[in-house]
Image (spheres, rainbow, N blue to C red):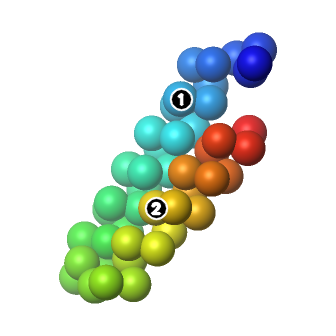
Amino acid sequence: MSFMPWRRTLLAVAAIFGTIVAAFSAGGSMESSQPITTAAEVAADQ
């Protein structure tokens, strides 16, 4: 479907990694689990 599958994968990995880092920075609160779904949806849309 995507003409650049590696780019989509890279974006997904970067988004998830960034969310994990943000979660650790925030102290791993329950709220930090929400952006993972959003980041995954955005990466899937790319």
Picture quarter containing residue 3?
top right
| Residue 22: x %, y % from top left | 37, 69
Q: Which residue lies at the image location 43% right of the left edge and 51% below the top edge? A: 16
If you read the primary sequence from the N terminus, does the residue marked by circle 1 or circle 2 appear first?
1
* Dot 1 crowding, Cα within 10 Å, few <14, some 14–19, many 20+: some
Q: Amino acid at mark 1?
A: Thr
Q: Is residue 20 left or right of residue 44?
A: left
- As drawn, the label of residue 20 is none
Residue placed under numbered mark 2 in the picture: 36
Q: Is residue 46 positioned above or below 40 on the image?
A: above
Q: Is residue 17 left or right of residue 25?
A: right
Q: Which residue lies at the image location 50% right of the left edge and 69% below the top edge? A: 35
Q: CA distance from mark 1 to mark 2?
A: 15 Å
Picture quarter containing residue 20?
bottom left
Q: Secondary structure at mark 1?
A: helix
Q: Which residue lies at the image location 57% right of the left edge and 38% below the top edge? A: 11
**Image quadrant occupied by the C terminus:** top right
Q: Nearer the viewer, residue 25 or 46?
A: 46
* Dot 2 crowding, Cα within 10 Å, few <14, some 14–19, many 20+: some
| Residue 37: x %, y % from top left | 51, 61
Q: Secondary structure at mark 2?
A: helix
Q: Which residue lies at the image location 46% right of the left edge and 61% below the top edge? A: 36
Which residue, as the protein is rendered here, is positioned at the far front? 1
**Image quadrant occupied by the N terminus:** top right
| Residue 23: x %, y % from top left | 32, 71
Picture quarter containing residue 29?
bottom left
Q: Amino acid at mark 2?
A: Ile
Q: Is residue 12 positioned above or below 29 on the image?
A: above
Q: Is residue 43 positioned above or below 5 on the image?
A: below
Q: Is residue 43 positioned above or below 4 on the image?
A: below
Residue placed under numbered mark 1 in the picture: 9
Which residue, as the protein is rendered here, is positioned at the far top? 3
